[in-house]
Image: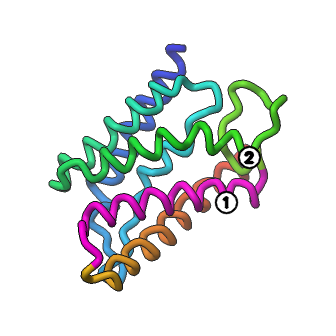
């Protein structure tokens, strides 16, 4: 179990640094922000304790909230995503699949992984930007932010998966 904790700790630091130092300052066309730290939640394996997924995800969301002065938006959205992820991943694998199966293109295939990551990233963006706007007065801006951020985040996640799939 200590290898799992070490791996999660390294991923936590990498995603926190990437988001806070680089990606959080990118706003393509004024709306699309790459939210690559969502990928952290998508990577949890099948047998990982649900309380661990919640704790790690809340922690990463809290770090993002602290650096970007978004009081609780990322922490709330990441915690919700962590609550959904283990059950949602079960929909894409067979019952007799390995207990430590990790969500990846290599393990579940391109189409399944695309829909798996699309839905989770979309849920995250919907919750995050809805809490951020806290109103639908300017729903066009909200929609542009949700669609743009979902698209750029999904593109980055699929790019990382492609690179990992080619490496081994």
Residue 86, horizontal then vertical, whole percent: 59, 37
- Asked if the magenta segment contains residue 46, the reply would be no
Q: Which mark identifies residue 39? A: none
Q: Position of residue 155 (x, y in %)?
A: 55, 67
Viewport quadrant of the C terminus: top right
Instruction: Pinpoint residue 138: horizontal percent, then vertical percent.
Output: 27, 83
Check the picture and name the quadrant holding the N terminus.
top right
Rendering quarter of residue 116: bottom right
Verify whether residue 123 appears in magenta: yes
Spatial CA span between label 1 and label 2: 9 Å
Q: Are marks 1 and 2 in contact (CB under 8 Å)?
A: yes
Q: Secondary structure at mark 1?
A: helix
User: What residue is rendered at 45% in x and 51% in y?
Assistant: 38
Give, as a single range, the part of the protein colored magenta: 109-136
Tag count? 2
* Numbered circle sitting on residue 115: 1
Dot 2 crowding, Cα within 10 Å, few <14, some 14–19, many 20+: some
Residue 7 position within the rendered picture, expressed as x and y whole percent measured from the top left: 50, 28
Which residue in the protein does label 2 denote?
92
**Camera-side residue of 77 and 101:** 77
49 or 19: nearer the eye?
A: 49
């Amino acid at each position: 179990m200590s290898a799992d904790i070490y791996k999660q700790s390294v991923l936590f630091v990498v995603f926190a640094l990437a988001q806070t130092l680089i990606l959080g300052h990118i706003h393509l066309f004024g709306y699309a922000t790459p939210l690559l730290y969502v990928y952290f939640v998508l990577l949890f394996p099948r047998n990982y304790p649900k309380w661990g997924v919640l704790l790690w995800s809340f922690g990463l969301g809290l770090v993002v909230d602290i650096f970007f002065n978004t009081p609780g938006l990322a922490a709330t959205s990441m915690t919700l995503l962590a609550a959904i992820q283990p059950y949602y991943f079960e929909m894409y694998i067979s019952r007799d699949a390995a207990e430590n199966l990790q969500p990846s293109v290599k393990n579940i295939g391109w189409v399944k992984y695309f829909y798996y990551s699309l839905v989770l990233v979309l849920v995250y963006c919907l919750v995050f930007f809805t809490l951020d706007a806290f109103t639908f007065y300017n729903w066009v801006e909200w929609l542009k932010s949700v669609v743009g951020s979902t698209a750029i985040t999904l593109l980055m996640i699929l790019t990382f998966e492609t690179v990992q799939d080619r490496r081994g």
